[in-house]
Image: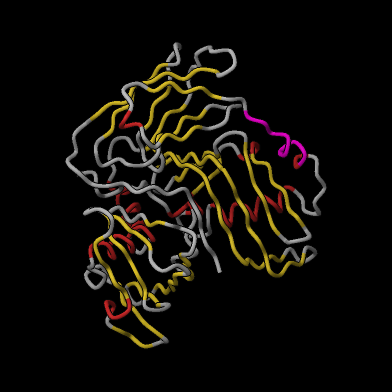
Amino acid sequence: MTNRLTLFFFIIPSILLSQSITGKVIDKVTQEPVETASIYFDQTTIGTTTNENGEFSIDYTDAVRSNLVISYLGYQKVLITDYRKLDNILVELEVATNALDEVFVNFDDELTRQQKLRLFKKEFIGTSRFANSCIILNEDKLVLYYDGKDNTLYASSEEPIRVKNRAIQYQIEFDIIDFEASYRNVDIEENTFILNSVRYLGTTFYKDLTNGSKRKVNRNRNKVYKGSVQHFFRALYNEDLKKESYQIYHKNKKVEEWDFIKISEGKTSSIKELRLKSKINILYKKSWQSTMELKTDHIYIDVYGNYSPIIGVYLTGYLGNQRLGDTLPSDFGLEK
């Protein structure tokens, strides 16, 4: 059973009034400004960098509710959630410690780096058509460690992993907080690894690489979107599963979706509560099969296709097999 885990925060739609955040980034010890620090909203294309004085200004709308991320190589990343309450932000960065990574670099863990890279790419980027169009631009920065005792692959990096998806023209910068892929059956001599579960945690920034005509790129982006986790949860939020070509089954029998899925108003008018009567099977366009099960009483969903909490939501099959190579910014298709 696979369970993809990423940092998630609700993005609540509202009147799209442009606002700005200003601030300054300094070294906590020296109090000197930090130039070219990355400032961005998690899982979006909205970002900037600090100037020579460590200062920044970043625009956003009321629709943006994801964390503001401040990141710079060699320092601990900072996440800010309450920036709307602040007139001006002062961020003091602390130097990061990478002692564990240094141990892993020189650790003999039975696998070659090439073997570990192959496993990492498969479980991080995926194996779909669009995942196969991805290249990691700085894979030399990856620190990979395989623990043979529990058959688990771990990954970290001192800088965000930059993945270029050529088919949909995004450069994805993923700052790894945690990555674990565990295997239930392993035969190193035969190079066989049967996955048990995978989870990865981090922050994501999307850079749009398109220029000029976007026709082919937009077609590919829409192909990625249709049938995706993002698409499915948006269909749940809008209660239009049938319209979006989803069918629900229970124990191999087609059922009325709302007999097994309950959607009700959540904590705010922009968030809804989702409950499942039992485990369901999901069929998209009569071809892609998935299952969904909740190990918690309920979860919350929003119009962007986000859901929370992530732990306790189990997706298998087509939805469960999607990886970074099949993701889009959280505001994709809802820019208006």
Residue at position x 44%, y 11% from top? Answer: 53
Residue at position x 77%, y 50% from top? Answer: 112
Image height of 45 relative to 248, above or below: above
Secondary structure character of the magenta stretch overall = helix
The answer to if 206 sits in the magenta stretch is no
Depth check, front residue: 141 or 146? 146
Side of 42 where 4 appears, left or right: right
Give the x, y percent position of residue 180: 62, 54
Side of 108 where 48 appears, left or right: left
Image-quadrant location for residue 242: bottom left
Side of 179 where 108 appears, left or right: right
Q: Where does the N terminus fall, quadrant-wise? A: bottom right
Give the x, y percent position of residue 68: 40, 34
Give the x, y percent position of residue 283: 36, 75
Image height of 331 relative to 235, above or below: above
Image-quadrant location for residue 299: bottom left
Q: Which residues are magenta?
A: 96-103
Residue at position x 31%, y 30% from top? Answer: 85
Q: Where does the C terminus fall, quadrant-wise? A: top left
Image-quadrant location for residue 183: bottom right
Depth check, front residue: 62 or 46? 62
Residue at position x 34%, y 59% from top? Answer: 300
Count of numbered tags: 0
- Indicate how the structure is coloured in the image: secondary structure
The answer to if 99 sits in the magenta stretch is yes
Give the x, y percent position of residue 161: 55, 39
Image height of 3 relative to 62, above or below: below
